Amino acid sequence: MKAVARAVGMALFALATGCGSLMQAPDQGYEPPGADVPLVRVPLDDEAQRLVSRARDSLARDNPGRVRDYLARIDGRYRYEPDVLLVHGMVDRMTEQPQKAMVHYETLLQVEPTHPGAANDLALLYREEGRIQEAKGLLSTALEAHPDRPRLHYNLAVLYELYLVDLEQALVHYREYQAHSDGEDEKVARWIKDLERRVE
């Protein structure tokens, strides 16, 4: 108990003084802390929320430089907020820095284990590395908490069809993807018909 109390005290001291490992930004060689160090979340204030919103807008405009500018203006105490970590991961993927993106997504999932955006994007990165079972686990876990997220169903269906060769499960998730999408995806509709013939 003394060791845990000491770790918590050190973490809070680091946050208060602006120094220590909890204040080291992920872009500066950050490694996720061990289980003994708490991930301290601080809700975004109005200004930080505006900066995150502007960073997201810049992502949509494919402007990673502006994204990083906005992120740099967010005080370091917000480093464990899911919205901040997610944008960091997204801009790292955009700029083809998958290892840095993984660190941000993995840290986010320590803070919020079923975050759908982080689980989806990290699963795609794992898939690119051939870590198929880990990708499947991420998507499945996220779907337990967010069963209405079409993109999670889509990417899990792709895993089942192309990597795990489980056509029945692929069919299940392609159908769920269609059911939860705003409109029917004609391409996926053709895949469903093809799979229906193949599993008969």
Image: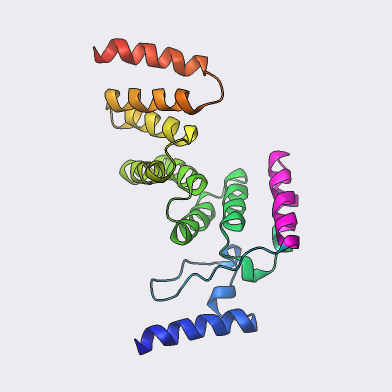
Nearest the viewer among 119 and 132 is 119
Q: Residue at x 48, y 53 (%)?
A: 102
Residue 57: x, y in percent?
A: 73, 44
Q: Residue at x 61, y 44 (%)?
A: 94
- Please tell me in which quadrant of the rendered image residue 45 appears: bottom right
Nearest the viewer among 35 and 30 is 35
Residue 177: x, y in percent?
A: 45, 27
Q: Is residue 26 magenta?
A: no
- Please tell me in which quadrant of the rendered image residue 154 appears: top left
Residue 32: x, y in percent?
A: 47, 66
Q: Is residue 147 above or below residue 49?
A: above
Q: Is residue 144 above or below residue 39?
A: above
What range is drawn magenta here?
46-70
Check the image and name the residue furthest to the bottom.
2
Residue 92: x, y in percent?
A: 59, 50
Q: Is residue 48 above or below residue 35?
A: above
Residue 163 appears left or right of 120: left
Q: Is residue 67 magenta?
A: yes
